[in-house]
Image (spheres, helix red, strand yellow):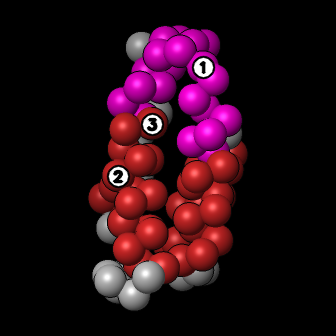
Amino acid sequence: GLIQVAAGYHKALAQRRAGGTVRLLAAGLEKLAAFPDGFAGLSLASFRDRVTLALAEAQAWSEGRRPGLDPDLAPPLERA
């Protein structure tokens, strides 16, 4: 899930591909949903919240309602 999220940000920020960004962020979130906050010592709840916001922006981008993904939405992965 973490790798898919990272690939989603790469797709958005380096390759500028809205559709791929949406697919990868959504797939990553789906996989990360299975893990509780604090799993492996990581603050997954706040990470998922930030990725969810980015996914909404990516969906708006793919629909032509915004020019791209805000790079400031890339969430830090912090220890719990």
Figure quadrant of the C terminus: top left
Q: Which residue is mark 1?
A: 35
Whether residue 57 is in magenta: the answer is: no
Residues in magenta?
Answer: 28-47
Residue 40, quarter of picture: top right
Please state which amino acid type lies under the numbered disc 3: Arg
- Which label sits on residue 59? none
Instruction: Please tell me which of labels 3 and 1 falls first in the chain.
Output: 1
Residue 48 coordinates in the image, percent (x, y):
45, 36
In the displayed structure, would residue 71 be above or below residue 64? above
Q: Residues within 10 Å of mark 3 (few under 14, many from 20)?
A: many
Disc 3 + disc 1, Cβ < 8 Å: no
Instruction: Please tell me which of labels 3 and 2 falls first in the chain.
Output: 3
Note whether residue 11 is visible.
Answer: no
Residue 54 coordinates in the image, percent (x, y):
39, 57
Q: Which residue is mark 3?
A: 48
- Which label sits on residue 53? 2
Look at the numbered disc 2 and give the secondary structure of its residue.
Answer: helix
Q: What's the residue at 53%, 15% (across, down)?
A: 36
Residue 52 coordinates in the image, percent (x, y):
41, 47
Look at the numbered disc 1 and give the secondary structure of its residue.
Answer: loop
Residue 7 coordinates in the image, percent (x, y):
65, 58
Figure quadrant of the N terminus: top right
